[in-house]
């Protein structure tokens, strides 16, 4: 396995509800290797989405450290985290979150508008991303003109258009039929194997989790199992 690109140490996360403090993650440590495809599983309330959000810099831990590359993101301010996320994290969501009035091209271009790029540079990166997900012929279509699987592929193109360090995916196949889900998981494996992307995916689906190289199981905020998965062939 390659050197760790994500290092989580002694992580705690709690929330306050009224006068009660609720522990969501407790004393959790883990490494994610560069170019690894990792899945997170566990029952509802186990803390897997909270962990994903912490690694992605969307939230900050109550205690412990999170380091991505050579940057300790757990000590960053909110403004520093926002700048870091723009360049280092691509997000893939269950329900796509595409803007319905924009074309596929315009939706993928959105993250690039936060960077100092020329229109020609943005065009080149958007077209490359859409070509990689097989949607060069759909770039002028709006989300309502695309199938669910095609919308999710637009979401993946949007996630990778900035060439991020990490791709984080929260139930990316949860709203798809089995054929479309397989296509999305195939695409993630291509991103990992051919482009060297590090992917962390939350899923409830054991079949989807098995497509990752490794699966971490969480229960009640604790890491209870760490399983290396058998290599899975791409499904067509």
Image (spheres, rainbow, N blue to C red):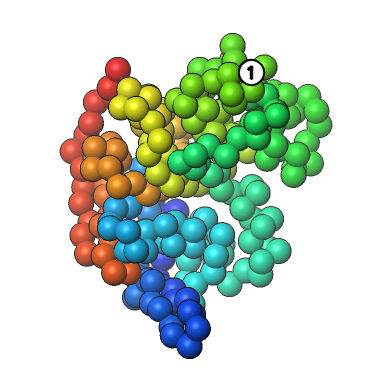
User: Residue beneath label 1, please?
Assistant: 141
> Looking at the picture, does residue 141 appear above or below residue 66?
above
Q: Is 104 left or right of 147, judged from the image as shown?
A: right
Visible residue check, residue 87? yes
> Looking at the picture, does residue 32 appear above or below residue 96?
below
> Looking at the picture, does residue 23 appear above or below residue 83?
below
SS for callout 1: loop
Residue drawn at (38%, 31%) of the image: 176
Q: Is 48 left or right of 214, judged from the image as shown?
A: right
Image quadrant in which the C terminus is located: top left
* Percent coordinates x, y for residue 25 in the rendering: 37, 71
> Residue pushed farthest bottom?
19
* Percent coordinates x, y for residue 163 in the rendering: 59, 38
> Residue pushed farthest left?
230
Q: Is 38 left or right of 120, judged from the image as shown?
A: left
How many neighbours does mark 1 have within 10 angstroms: few (below 14), some (14-19), or many (20 or more)? some
Residue drawn at (56%, 48%) of the image: 89
> Residue pushed farthest top?
137
Q: What is the quadrant of residue 80 in the picture?
A: bottom right
């Amino acid at each position: 396995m390659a050197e760790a690109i994500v290092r989580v140490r002694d992580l705690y996360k709690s929330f306050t509800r009224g006068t009660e403090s609720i522990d969501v993650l407790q004393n959790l440590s883990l490494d994610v290797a560069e170019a690894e495809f990792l899945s997170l599983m566990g029952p509802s309330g186990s803390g897997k989405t909270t962990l994903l959000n912490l690694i992605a810099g969307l939230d900050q831990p109550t205690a412990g450290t999170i380091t991505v590359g050579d940057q300790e993101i757990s000590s960053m301010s909110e403004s520093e985290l926002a700048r870091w996320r723009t360049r280092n994290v691509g997000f893939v969501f269950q329900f796509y979150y595409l803007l319905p009035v924009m074309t596929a091209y315009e939706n993928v271009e959105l993250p690039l508008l936060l960077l100092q790029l020329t229109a020609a540079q943005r065009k080149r990166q958007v077209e490359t991303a859409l070509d990689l997900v097989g949607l060069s012929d759909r770039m002028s279509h709006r989300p309502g003109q695309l199938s669910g699987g095609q919308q999710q592929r637009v979401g993946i193109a949007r996630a990778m258009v900035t060439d991020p360090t990490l791709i984080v995916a929260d139930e990316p196949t949860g709203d798809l039929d089995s054929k479309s889900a397989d296509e999305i998981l195939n695409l993630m494996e291509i991103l990992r194997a051919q482009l060297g992307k590090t992917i962390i995916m939350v899923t409830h689906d054991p079949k989807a989790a098995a497509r990752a190289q490794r699966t971490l199981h969480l229960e009640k905020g604790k890491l209870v199992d760490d399983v290396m998965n058998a290599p899975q062939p791409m499904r067509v």
